[in-house]
Amino acid sequence: MDLSEIMISKEEIASMVTRVAGEINKDYKDEELVVIGILTGAFVFTADLVRELDMPVIIDFMQVKSYQGTTSTGTLTIKRDISTDIKDKHVLIVEDIIDTGNTLKALKELLLSRGPKSLKICTAFDKPSRRVNDLTPDYNGITVPDEFIVGYGLDFDGAYRNLKEVRIVR
Ligand code: IMP
Ligand code: MG
């Protein structure tokens, strides 16, 4: 197993974060926002994104699992739930990457059942060619081709999350 050359540079990632945060700031203005980062992959993106947000922000994390190696199992297990009550709150889910969309579709249904005032999805990366449902992010950082990528929080069996840039696993 090998890593490719840099696919997405740290400069491209930084400007993506600024752009996405700008869209979110414009949409929510001064409304309080509950940001739910999806562990483990979204910890890096969540940390960068929230520091660019202007409204009052509550940050929580949730850990779900639908992946083994490089194939989606399609089943969602909650490994860690949020401790924030999201009823009547504006909620933004922050994800590292959307692949089949199975994880977020199930998670969205679950969080909607708790009665938030609104619920939107923000992802650092999107692989729309792999989608098996109608899930679309409200905020998308960078659209990527059908390759397994690592870095900027994304892992291959736990490794490479700390890379500053994104590379392809071969
Ligand atoms: P989905 O349920 O198929 O959309 O899978 C989403 C989850 O799979 C993400 O949160 C990642 O943890 C993982 N994943 C999907 N594609 C990749 C990839 O290219 N690299 C690393 N993790 C990935
Ligand atoms: Mg993962």
Image (spheres, grey):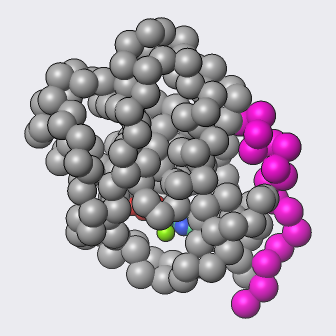
Where residue 88 appears, x then y in whole percent? 17, 22
Quadrant location, the C terminus = bottom right
Which residue corresponds to the image point at 56% horizontal and 25% vertical from the top-left? 53
The one nearer the camera, 45 or 110, is 45
Which residue corresponds to the image point at 60% horizontal and 65% vertical from the top-left? 154
Q: Residue furthest right?
A: 5
> Is 51 situated above or below 54?
below
In the picture provided, is 161 more to the left or to the right than 92?
right
Where residue 1 appears, x then y in whole percent? 73, 90
Which residue corresponds to the image point at 48% horizontal and 58% vertical from the top-left? 99
Note whether residue 45 is visible.
yes
> Is 14 situated above or below 161?
above
- In the image, the segment drawn in magenta is 1-16
Magenta-span inclusion, residue 12: yes
Picture quadrant of residue 54: top right
Magenta-span inclusion, residue 96: no
The one nearer the camera, 103 or 93, is 93
Which residue corresponds to the image point at 71% horizontal and 36% vertical from the top-left? 16
The one nearer the camera, 47 or 113, is 47
> Is 144 situated above or below 117?
below
Where residue 107 appears, x then y in whole percent? 26, 51
